[in-house]
Image (cartoon, helix red, strand yellow):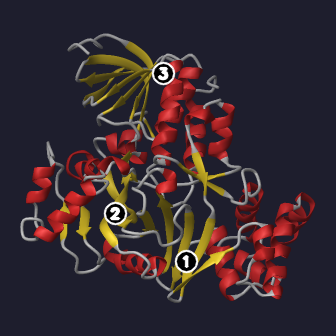
Amino acid sequence: MAPNELDGMQFDVVVFGTGLEESIIASKAAAGKKSVLHVDRNPYYGGSNACFSLSKMLEWAFCHRNCSQTPSVEVLVGGQLTDAPTFVISDVASDQCDMDTLQRLAPFELSPECTKKLQEMLKNDRDYMIELVPKVVFCRGEVTEMLISCEIGEYVQFKGVAHSYLARNGTIERIPESKEDIFASNSLSLIEKRKLMRLMTMVSDNTLYAHLLDKYGDSQFTQLLQDKFKLSGMLLDAVLYLIARVNRGDTISAREGCERVHKYVKSIGRYGRMAYLCGMYGGGSEISQSFCRLCAVSGGTYILNETVAAIEPASENEFSVVLDHGTVRAKQIVMSPDYASTAVPKDQIVSRAICILDNTCLGADTTALASYVDDSGVVSLLYVTHSTMTVPSGQSILYAWVEGSLEETRSLLTSAIQTTIDSKASPLLSIFMETHELDVSETESRGIVVTRAPDATVDLDSVVLSAQHVVSTYFSNSR
């Protein structure tokens, strides 16, 4: 693109960031006959939902991360999650990064063994697709319904999340998902099977489910499970923390808890004996790009690697946007929170760990979700193998995340990973980081729409609902 080529152009909407929420909004606006300019400062699609090869993941940490949102990234090389050779990427992002730079960093300068391990992994660099914010989608949820209704489902490939695990008290157990799995389970007693089947039957039958909500909706969810369904111990924890995804210490109503279980149960059977699907090749990024394609087909304009110099009011109903390739006018601005120049970190933090393992620990050709529960909190875990085309054959990736700062949750994350691995695999490389929610109130006060930062949920439905809210509020005539 020539310098100043954009000068003087006018758009109905300019969208900054190519994460999933921004991409959905851009595609919907374009489908509604709005002129759309979709810009990303980075040389890749996906924004906060991006995924990378191993070298590109390290490059992201050095060059592209937003330092207010992700203050530091810790990289551990070797088979230990504690006392392993570590380098910390912090302060400000650098202008450039190459593998020579990485290998000169401590501890590689001091440890030839670490250098050798990293070089061995980089031989298969393009076989890794590492997600910044790993998520799954419900088989019968907002994401799948939107992909189908927009007729772009063929752009994305999925693999069923075949197994669910509950880790607690130093052990990990597989939890049956479907009615067939419950009947076939050897880990549940006959009485436990009856209790679990009673719950699943009641929430899957619309009449019984409506009666359950009418009678018990205002009570506490935990109390309902204990008093009416007689759940305790492992079964109670499985329903609370694995199916309903309740945070440790949180109290939710029976209505909200039953709605979560209902959504889970209704998703089972649509594409097999599982409630969730995991995207191939890095799900969040692939889904984001499918909506970017849809926007482009509808006439949207895309520019990557484009710096936003300034956004100023041009008139009462227009903004002036200064970019590398010229100054444009826009009636509406939508941006990812990391584009807000006045954004400051808030106390809401999600800490994340990414472990590349030298072996498969929960199955060689499968994908699994797990919850680790102890008195400190609940850690969500996603396990992927070569079957999702995101890691070399014979290796696997275990993602773990929890609400709270890394200082507060490091030991919890480490315990969750170690319990899940259960001595069946060793980390080749581990990455720890924390993501802060950003306060964008000053930016929003200027009439700019700011999307949501990634949260600690395991699925993407909240992203779609947030995007739909923006579309209905600001682009009511968009499809």
**Marks 2 & 3, CB-CB < 8 Å contact:** no
Q: Which mark is residue 296?
A: 3
What residue would you read off at disc 1? 248
- What is the number of callouts on the image? 3
Depth check, front residue: 394 or 206? 394
> Which image quadrant is residue 306 in?
top left
Q: Is residue 369 above or below residue 131?
A: below
Amino acid on which the number 1 mark rests in the picture: Arg
> Residue 414's spot in the image, x, y percent?
38, 78
Q: How far apart are marks 2 and 3 (CA)?
A: 33 Å
The residue drawn where x is 70% and y is 84% is 187
Q: How far apart are marks 2 and 1 (CA)?
A: 19 Å
Which element carries disc 2, helix, strand or loop? strand
In the displayed structure, 274 sits above or below 3; it is: below
Q: What element carries label 1?
A: loop
Q: Which circle's residue, 2 or 3, is located before the other in the chain?
A: 3
Q: Say which amino acid is labelled 2.
A: Glu
> Mark 2 sits on what residue?
434
